Image (cartoon, rainbow, N blue to C red):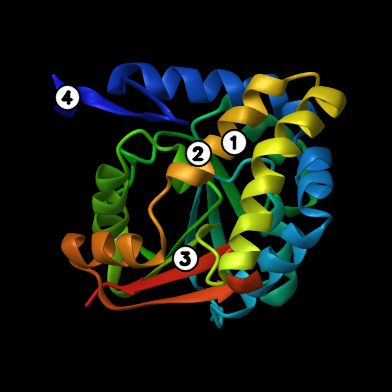
Amino acid sequence: MNNLKTNFGKLKVNKNQKTRLVQKIFTDVAQKYDLMNDLMSFGTHRIWKRKFIEIMNLQNKDNILEVGSGTGDLLRIISEVNSNTSITSTDLNKQMLYFNKNKYKDLKNKIKWKVCNAENLPFKNKIFDKYIIAFCLRNITDINKALIEAERVLKCGGIFYCLEFSSPNNLIVKKMYDYYKINFIPLIGEKIANNKSAYKYLEESITTFPNQEKLINKLKEIGFKKTSYIDLFNGIVSIHIGYKI
């Protein structure tokens, strides 16, 4: 039965439970999600996300799939960097996507919104130029399934981009970061969002997520080529890249 278990934070739960548990968390925090991101990262998540989009070298007429779009921070940046792209914004959580869609009504002619699961995307093979996922992969029940789906929907020559919390390179930075995650993230969640348990899960999901090298190895196993990663803030977050060739 162990192969049916997966991490929900530091807990081991049945795979068929994790998706439901994670979605409940994001439904509960959706209204204060943007505020909490600013508070927990001291606003630096905006710098990370802009850097993430800027390194993509977006081309005119790129067909982009964003998975786990949440409240849609990346959509505005993409439209500012290159307004001649086509974007499909997806999320499994209806509440999050509702806020996303209402926040970007002015972009409705260039964005399509779709509620769907990253493990089973409702798209044909080989149709997207870029697959992007930011601060979501660690919340997916079966990461390998999601990566297989990413490879499937990308065109030959398409590129996978993942922005995710990772492991700091410097031991002192790591200790300080670990202390902050464990002691302050749940406290901020309790005081601001009135939901300590949701942000305790956030801390634990970051801690148990594969580090840079382990995630690169997963990409290689799926079949991505020319894989690499770019560390930001000493590896507190990292951008992972893989090509479909």
Q: Residue at x 71, y 22 (%)?
A: 196
Q: Residue at x 25, y 25 (%)?
A: 5
In the rendering, at what x and y percent does residue 107 appear?
73, 54
> In the rendered structure, which amino acid carries the disc numbered 2?
Ser
> In the rendered structure, which amino acid carries the disc numbered 1?
Leu
Q: CA distance from mark 3 to mark 4?
A: 39 Å
In the rendering, at what x and y percent does residue 125 appear?
24, 55
- Nearer the observer: mark 1 or 3; the answer is 1
- Circle nearer the N terminus (3, 4): 4
Q: Residue at x 24, y 56 (%)?
A: 152
| Residue that label 3 marks | 63
Residue 14 sits in quarter: top left
In the rendering, at what x and y percent does residue 75 appear?
67, 57
Image quarter (top left, top right, bottom left or bottom right) of the N terminus? top left
Crowd around label 2: few <14 · some 14–19 · many ≥20 (10 Å)? some
- Residue 110 or residue 117, whichever sits in front: 117
CB under 8 Å between callouts 1 and 2? yes
CB under 8 Å between callouts 1 and 3? no
Q: CA distance from mark 1 to mark 2?
A: 5 Å
| Residue that label 2 marks | 205
| Residue that label 4 marks | 2
| Residue that label 1 marks | 202
Q: CA distance from mark 2 to mark 3?
A: 30 Å
Asked whether, in this view, residue 127 is left or right of residue 224, the answer is right
Q: Is residue 27 visible?
A: yes
Q: CA distance from mark 1 to mark 4?
A: 23 Å
Residue 33 sits in quarter: top right
In the rendering, at what x and y percent does residue 140 appear?
40, 37
Q: Which mark is residue 16?
A: none
Q: Which structural element holds mark 1?
A: helix
